[in-house]
Image (tube, rainbow, N blue to C red):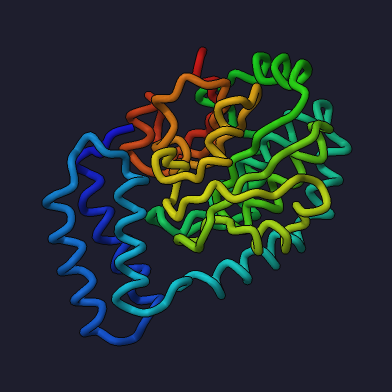
Amino acid sequence: MRTFLDCYPCFLNQALRAGRLATDDETQIKRLLDEVGGMLKTIPIESSPAETGRLIYRKVSEITANPDPYRQVKERNIHKALGLYPGLKKIVAQSDDPLLTALRIAIAGNVIDLGAPGEFDIEKEIEDVLEKPFAISDYKIFKDHLQHARSVLYLADNAAECVFDRILIEEMKKPVTFVVRERPVINDATREDALKAGLGELSTVVSSGTDAPGTVLETCCREFKELFYRSEFIISKGQGNYEALSGQQRPIFFMLKAKCSVVAADLGVAVGDIILKDINA
């Protein structure tokens, strides 16, 4: 997905939010905004928002000397998500279609996005997503592909969201390779976050090699790209991964909530809609 004009003020807002978490020094934050604003003039509109995000969050770390400004927030959100886990497992077990319910719960976890504008209430989000109709639903295709797949490549998004992904992984009952970011960026999942969420016991946790807030293949390591191109079933979580991979011709299922007008328009849905999209459908 390319960058749209509405993305540019969002880039500055992201820099401001991250800068305020990283430091109390107003001089550093002003320098950050100045430098990000200068960067935006040279960024081609053809690049994806995830590629630009990588440059912005690198600049945050460089100027503030804080490589992980969202660390404490991530830890709090993972702790809260783990507290919800037993109740969510009961909901899945008691449902008419446990796989679909687990899938909905995984999408509900996608609301925990500190790079997107707005607040979130995860308990309310779960209630809403369990009842909300899909704006795009390729669930039948998903089930068929899952049945025939020998394994699943699962591209993670946010740290606390991993707990909700865990519920879906347990329900899919297939060998899973769970892919995280190489280094902290926003509140995206790293290896440490995935292990805290319990994914180490259920899957093989690997890094994509990138510190972009999305799977920008040009910045990923060779080992991950080899895995990506030979995978027969790929789950891609969240907006950042959609922005980076929507032009790929691979067996990808995008799972997300549309949290901004740009992504919603690209998908042809409304802000707030939930999506399960087969890239090839």
In the image, 183: left or right of 116? right
Q: Answer with the quarter of the image where residue 261 lies.
A: top left
Residue 26 percent coordinates (x, y): 24, 84
In the image, 33: left or right of 209? left
Q: Residue at x 47, y 42 (%)?
A: 215
Residue 160 percent coordinates (x, y): 63, 58
* Viewer-closest of 186 and 215: 215
Q: Residue at x 29, y 68 (%)?
A: 16
Q: Which residue is drawn at 61% across and 55% down?
A: 122
Q: Answer with the quarter of the image where residue 128 lies.
A: top right
Compared with residue 27, is residue 251 higher up or lower down, i.e. above or below? Answer: above
Residue 38 percent coordinates (x, y): 13, 60
In the image, 251: left or right of 94? left
Q: Answer with the quarter of the image where residue 5 lies.
A: top left
Residue 199 percent coordinates (x, y): 75, 52
Number of numbered discs present? 0
Q: Which residue is drawn at 29% across and 50% down?
A: 52
Q: Residue furthest front?
A: 222
